[in-house]
Image: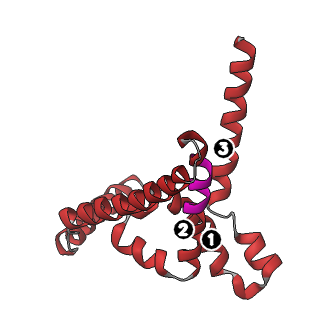
């Protein structure tokens, strides 16, 4: 009945208003500062790693690949130890945006299902979150490559 829908909508709006009054507001400034500091520290670690590879005589452009690999390893390693998840609770996007957050998004679901075994647990669930990102990223890069090739 049309009258019931209007009544339910009004009740829903009233309920949402009451919930918004009661719900505690997140400390926005604190969250932004944590994200900035943690994201910055992750970037500093990445810069130190890159500077190390450059100090070994590697050109800066070539040092980018090994630096990314080390940062992905560190993200996965600290996720496996449970440290990265705790950091993510406090830092939010500061820990999710850098490349270490990508490693965390792959390893975290796998760790969640390790009780089910290496094949059906870790292996099957590893790409639950990151899988669609990888697929769309590769598909997009393939399409862009085709367009680039076609335009030449």
State the SS at label 2: helix
Q: Which residue is mark 3?
A: 136
Q: Which residue is mark 1?
A: 107
Q: Which residue is mark 2?
A: 75
Q: Are marks 2 and 1 in contact (CB under 8 Å)?
A: yes
Which of these two is toward me, 5 or 81? 81
The answer to which of marks 3 and 2 sits earlier in the sequence is 2
Q: Is residue 4 visible?
A: no
The magenta stretch is 64-71
Q: Residue at x 79, y 80 (%)?
A: 118
Quarter that holds the N terminus: bottom left
The answer to which of marks 2 and 1 sits earlier in the sequence is 2
User: 80 left or right of 138?
Assistant: left
Q: Quadrant of residue 35?
A: bottom left
Q: Residue at x 42, y 71 (%)?
A: 88
Q: Quadrant of residue 45?
A: bottom left
Disc 3 to disc 1, how far (Cα)?
19 Å
Image colouring: secondary structure
State the SS at label 3: helix
Which of these two is toward me, 30 or 80? 80
Quarter that holds the C terminus: top right
The answer to which of marks 3 and 1 sits earlier in the sequence is 1
**Viewer-nearest of labels 3 and 2?**
2
Q: Is residue 86 visible?
A: yes
User: 3 left or right of 122?
Assistant: left
Q: Main secondary structure of the magenta part?
A: helix
């Amino acid at each position: 009945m049309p009258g019931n829908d209007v009544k339910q909508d009004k009740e829903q709006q009233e309920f949402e208003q009451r919930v918004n009054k009661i719900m505690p507001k997140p400390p926005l400034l604190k969250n932004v500062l944590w994200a900035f500091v943690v994201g910055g520290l992750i970037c500093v670690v990445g810069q130190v790693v890159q500077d190390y590879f450059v100090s070994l005589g590697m050109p800066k452009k070539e040092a980018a690949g090994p630096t990314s690999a080390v940062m992905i390893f560190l993200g996965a390693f600290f996720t496996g130890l449970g440290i990265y998840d705790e950091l993510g609770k406090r830092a939010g996007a500061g820990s999710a945006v850098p490349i270490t957050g990508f490693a965390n998004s792959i390893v975290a679901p796998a760790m969640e299902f390790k009780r089910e075994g290496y094949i059906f647990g870790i292996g099957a669930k590893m790409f639950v979150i990151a899988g669609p990102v990888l697929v769309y990223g590769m598909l997009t890069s393939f399409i862009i490559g085709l367009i680039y090739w076609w335009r030449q």
